[in-house]
Image (cartoon, grey):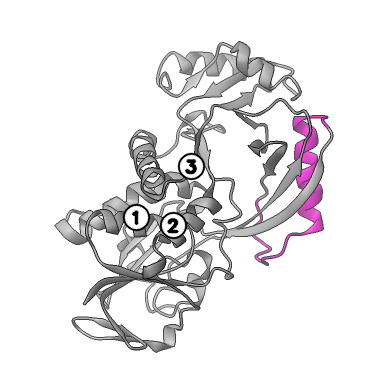
Amino acid sequence: MTDFLIVGRGLAESVLMHTVKKHSISFTAIGNQHLSSCSSVAAGIWNPIVFKRLTKSWLADDLISFLLPFYSDCESEMETSFVKLRAIVKPFTEEQERMLWLRKSETELLNFIKSPMDEQITAEISQCKVPNGYGTVNQAGNINVKLFIESSAAFFSKHIYDDVFDHNLLKIYSDRVCYKYFEFKNIIFCEGFLVKDNPFFNWIPLKPAKGEILTIKMQNFRLKETIFNKNGFILNTGEDEYKAGATYAWDDLSQEPTKRRMNELRLKINQMTDHSYRVVSHEAGIRPSSVDRRPIIGAHPTYSSLFVFNGLGTKGVMLAPYFANNFVNFYLKKEPLNESVHVKRFYHLYGKKEN
């Protein structure tokens, strides 16, 4: 009997497939590539720093140390390239910010940020608006999320069914679950925002945030190897093509891009550079953030063979590899899940929402 049925078709599902394979756990995955997923829209940036408070993001040291080996192994195994190490450039808005950056670059953030300006980076951002100097974030970068997901789907093609999962066809027994004509020991749902339609886990408290992003063409723009971040970001994705984003909206969870956010994105770009550009595409996705900004992982309170892996929010690229490994060790070795991500913190909500 197959160990796991993995439901989903995004970053979380792709990372889990690689993780369970590494631990010799058998699996089948099911998901529809045309259903909503913010993964294929995302720029895939990882950033260990919270700029608003100039502090390390939650578990930054652990996540970063796990992230690079994981994605590098995936690149080697799939014989493709989707990881890019890049410094993030953060322009200063005032002298006080520059002084704070300088102090922390010599103390608690020594391994993550730099204050002295770099000649190569200064040349790269010469067409960007940097009136008061800048700092840089090390141990940052991005992955081509769409390429990672597509490459993973091709690599695991014999294990994947491209279909819409019908929760009504799932039958749960004490020692297995059955879906259509197939039997599995367990099932794990990686449905992102669409968990709202899952009658077994629609009670988990997500706080979804819609995000919109532009793909633009900018000829002779020097920004190639770094990510420019000033109330938004500009990121080179090849030749003269760039991604610019992103927006946040909690009151509109439609899956279509909007004119309002297009105008907001244009304003963000204009605040970062006066360089001319042409819009190639405008996309939207729904980020599956949780109410406490932590992933939601673990077993159903009643059905021990049903699991959820969700709530990765805006930092899925950083969070997914580390917590997929945490989940597998929890499953195989009975090692505890990180208390901050365990779904049991929301068990009190189970049964309060009608299925």
Question: Tag 3: residue type?
Answer: Ser
Mark 1 or mark 2: which comes first in sequence? Answer: 1
Residue 337, percent from left and from top = 25, 54
| Circle 1 crowding by C-alpha within 10 Å: few under 14, some 14–19, many from 20 | many
Please determine whether, in this image, residue 350 is positioned above or below residue 293: below
User: Disc 1 versus disc 3: distance between alpha carbons?
Assistant: 16 Å
Give the CA separation, mark 2 to mark 3: 12 Å
Q: Quadrant of the C terminus?
A: bottom left
Q: Are marks 1 and 2 in contact (CB under 8 Å)?
A: yes
Q: Residue furthest left?
A: 333
For the residue labelled by badge 3, is the local secondary structure a helix, a strand or a loop?
loop
Task: Place residue 272 in its image quadrant.
Answer: top right
- Asked where in the image residue 254 lies, by quadrant, the reply is bottom right
Q: Is residue 300 visible?
A: no
First in residue order: circle 2 vs circle 3: 3
Q: Is residue 17 left or right of residue 57?
A: left
Mark seen at residue 81: 3
Q: Secondary structure at mark 1?
A: helix
Q: Secondary structure at mark 2?
A: helix
**Residue drawn at (18%, 59%) of the image:** 332
Image mark for residue 18: 1
Q: How many marks?
A: 3
Mark 2 vs 3: CB contact within 8 A: no
Residue type at mark 2 is Ser
Label 1–label 3 contact, CB within 8 A:
no
Q: CA distance from mark 1 to mark 2?
A: 8 Å
Q: Which residue is mark 2?
A: 152
Quick one: label 2, few (<14), some, or many (20+) residues within 10 Å? many
Whether the magenta-drawn stretch holds residue 128 is answered as no
User: What's the residue type where badge 1 is placed?
Assistant: His
Indicate left or right for 170 with 254 as reference. left
Q: Position of residue 154 (x, y in %)?
A: 45, 61
